[in-house]
Every structure is written in structure tokens, then in C-alpha cells.
């Protein structure tokens, strides 16, 4: 089937479903996929839209943790689905960073840290880019989820209460947040999943205000100081915007670090004669660069393969077959704890 025919068939089926169907797409999706969506946004914006809509069926074009978050938020007060469901056209699309933490090892780390050092409460904070069982472990221990956009506010809230934080799974996001909050590098210690006791001594834990899980986004973590030097040399006077999942040494060189939404908003407010070097996933950078002004260039083109797995053909497949292998249903016993972590974030 040609691309246009696929699109026409998707549109025909969408019309049949009307408001009972909602198709959501993340900013990092290919433009052909974005064209099939009712709304495009970052993971949290999209999950909020899913929760606020009355749609019976939600097709989530993104990676697994995003579809899981939508499923967690559409459940009723008792955690039941009530006839609503979330579908992922490319069910194999996961997130390598989310997979760097699981509920069991996060629980073991939290137990280890709280038993060894109890001078302050230890609050888990998990990035929304995490699996449902990680969010549930966080929620169970009174912790909160956060996004790259509100992470600073969430971390500050618990630090101001005097708590120590166990942050998972992205070490770079939380290190950048601590730097922005003015904490010295010694206030962050790294929990190494593969080492006994996380590789941390009691003294190191006591000295730290935040313990960073040793995960990272392989896309954003691959940016280097050399990339920045090359881009600055090629585009003198340009403003450098980098996603805070980049390593601290690179993010520190940016004019601004910002979530996907933050980057989009900054560019939307810019003067027409400005030039921006943007350090985030390439699907989004290419879409931003299509506009005539301001000028947008990539820090270094880099694609998230998982984000690129969804195609219009797969959306059509879901619409035609409602193939159960594409259904995303979070384990019932995880839903309420996982949602508690997301709701705590929304309340802050
Ligand atoms: S860009 Fe990074 S955080 Fe986002 S889905 Fe890909 S690997 Fe995960």
C-alpha cells in the first residue's frame, strides 16, 4: 500500500471511531507518524491528554514506558481499566534507559541505603522515563516521579525537606539538576547496580544529598565536549540548547538546558535572525529545522532507534486488527503505587 493510501485508510478508520479513539505521538516520532496523530507532545503532556480524554482506545506512538504511563493514568480510582485501553503500534519499542532499572533492584538499593545510613529520610524520585514497576516501587516508599521539565522543582522540594534522594534511572539528569541548584559535585554519589552495596561506603552515602542510579539515555549521553566545540566553531554566535540527559560536562557548556518542550518553547519565542544548535533526538531537530527562521542546526544528528520503530503501517495494523500483542496493560497490582508517584509529582 502506498503511503498516501495507508494514510487515507487510517483517516477513514479514525472517522469511524470518532471521539472514542485518540492517537498520540511523541515529539521524537517520524513526521509520517506525527501526521497520523491527534496530538503530539512530550511523554507527560501526552499521558495527561490520555487521562483527560474520554477515548475508549488510545494508540500511543512512542516507547513502552510512555504507553504504560498513559495506562496508569486512565485507570479508575481502584486501578481498574473500565473498558478503556492503550495500544502501542510498535510493541517492541522500549527505552534502553528505562530498562537500566527494575523494581526489584531499586527496592534492594533503597533498603540497603536506608539500613546503612538513617540520619535523613531517603526519598526515591524516578524519572517518568522508567518502567511501571520502578514507578510503583517509588510510589510505595512515598517518592515522586519527575520529568526533565519539572525535575528541578521535584528534587528541590525533597531536598528542602531535608531528605536524601535516590534518583533513578538517569544519572545525568539528576546531576545537572543538582548543579543548577548550586550543590557541589560531592553532594552526588553514584549507585553502581553491579557492585556490592552499590560501590558506596557509609561515609560516601552520609556525605551525599542525592544518590544517582548509574543509568543514562544512550542517545543524549553520547554528546561530547568535542561535539560542542565543533558546533560552536561552525556556527559562531549561535545559542546552544541541550537536553539535560546529556552528561554534566557537556550540559555545562550549553547556553540553556531544557526538556523537549523547553527547547520547542525557547525556539518558538526566538527572534527570526537567531541561530540555535540543538542537542536532542534528530527526528525533532529535523522537524524544527523545517521552519525558515530561526535557523536550527543539530549538535550532532543522532536517532533513537526505538523511537523510530513506529510506522503508519503499524498504526493501520492496530486500527484494522486490534491485535492483542499491541495492547499495553500494566500489571494490576502495580497501578495504584505507580500512579501515586505520578500524582505526587503533579501535586508539586
Ligand atoms: S531518546 Fe533516550 S530516553 Fe528517549 S526513548 Fe530513546 S533511549 Fe529512551
Image: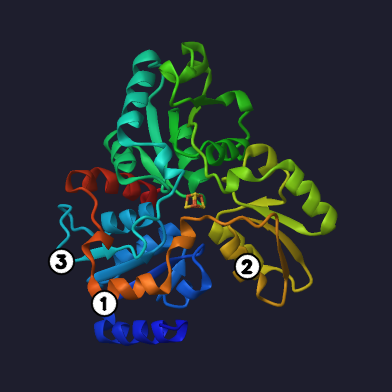
Depth check, front residue: 107 or 151: 107
Task: State the SS at label 3.
Answer: loop
Q: Is residue 161 visible?
A: no
Find disc 2 in the rendering and name its residue: 286
Q: Which of pointers 3 and 1 indicates the residue nearer the eye?
A: 1
Q: Residue at x 42, y 44 (%)?
A: 98
Crowd band around label 3 with a 10 angstrom C-alpha radius: few (<14), some (14–19), many (20+): few
**Percent from the top left, x then y, of residue 245?**
56, 45
- 117 sits to left or right of 187: left
Find disc 1 in the rendering and name its residue: 320
Q: Is residue 42 visible?
A: yes
Q: Are marks 1 and 2 in contact (CB under 8 Å)?
A: no
- 136 sits to left or right of 149: left
In whole angstroms, how far apart are the C-alphas of marks 3 and 2? 38 Å
Where residue 18 sits, quadrant-wise, is bottom left
Q: Are marks 3 and 2 in contact (CB under 8 Å)?
A: no
Beta carbon of the mark 3 residue lies under 8 A of ligand 1: no
Crowd band around label 2 with a 10 angstrom C-alpha radius: few (<14), some (14–19), many (20+): some
Task: State the SS at label 2.
Answer: helix
Name the N-terminal-most of marks 3 and 1: 3
Name the N-terminal-most of marks 3 and 2: 3
Depth check, front residue: 227 or 213: 227
**Percent from the top left, x then y, of residue 94?**
40, 51
Find disc 3 in the rendering and name its residue: 83
**Percent from the top left, x then y, of residue 280?**
60, 55
Amino acid at each position: 500500500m502506498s503511503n498516501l493510501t495507508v494514510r487515507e485508510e487510517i483517516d477513514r478508520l479514525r472517522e469511524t471511531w470518532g471521539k472514542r479513539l485518540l492517537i498520540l505521538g511523541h515529539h521524537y516520532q517520524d513526521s509520517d507518524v506525527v501526521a497520523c496523530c491527534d496530538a503530539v507532545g512530550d511523554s507527560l503532556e501526552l499521558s495527561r491528554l490520555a487521562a483527560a480524554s474520554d477515548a475508549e482506545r488510545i494508540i500511543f506512538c512512542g516507547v513502552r514506558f510512555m504507553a504504560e504511563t498513559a495506562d496508569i493514568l486512565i485507570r479508575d480510582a481502584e486501578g481498574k481499566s473500565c473498558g478503556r485501553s492503550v495500544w502501542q503500534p510498535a510493541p517492541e519499542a522500549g527505552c534502553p534507559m528505562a530498562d537500566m532499572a527494575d523494581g526489584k533492584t531499586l527496592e534492594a538499593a533503597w533498603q540497603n541505603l536506608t539500613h546503612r545510613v538513617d540520619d535523613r529520610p531517603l526519598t526515591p524520585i524516578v524519572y517518568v522515563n522508567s518502567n511501571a514497576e520502578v514507578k510503583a516501587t517509588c510510589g510505595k516508599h512515598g517518592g515522586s516521579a519527575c520529568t526533565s521539565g519539572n525535575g528541578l522543582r521535584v528534587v528541590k522540594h525533597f531536598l528542602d525537606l531535608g531528605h536524601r534522594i535516590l534518583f533513578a534511572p538517569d544519572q545525568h539528569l539528576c546531576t545537572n539538576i543538582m548543579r543548577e541548584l548550586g550543590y557541589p559535585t560531592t553532594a552526588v554519589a553514584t549507585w553502581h547496580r553491579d557492585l556490592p552495596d552499590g560501590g558506596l561506603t557509609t561515609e560516601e552515602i552520609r556525605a551525599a544529598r542525592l544518590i544517582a542510579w548509574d543509568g543514562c539515555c544512550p542517545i543524549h549521553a553520547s554528546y561530547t565536549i568535542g561535539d560542542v566545540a565543533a558546533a560552536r566553531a561552525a556556527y559562531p554566535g549561535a545559542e546552544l540548547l541541550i537536553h539535560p540527559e546529556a552528561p554534566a560536562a557537556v550540559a555545562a557548556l550549553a547556553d540553556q538546558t531544557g526538556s523537549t518542550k523547553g527547547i520547542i518553547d525557547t525556539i518558538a519565542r526566538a527572534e527570526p535572525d537567531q541561530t540555535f544548535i540543538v542537542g536532542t533526538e534528530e527526528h525533532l531537530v529535523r522537524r524544527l529545522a523545517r521552519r525558515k527562521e530561526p535557523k536550527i542546526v543539530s549538535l550532532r544528528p543522532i536517532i533513537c532507534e526505538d523511537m523510530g520503530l513506529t510506522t503508519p503501517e503499524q498504526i493501520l495494523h492496530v486500527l484494522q486488527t486490534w491485535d492483542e500483542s499491541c495492547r499495553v496493560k500494566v500489571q494490576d497490582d502495580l497501578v495504584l503505587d505507580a500512579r501515586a508517584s505520578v500524582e505526587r509529582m503533579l501535586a508539586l
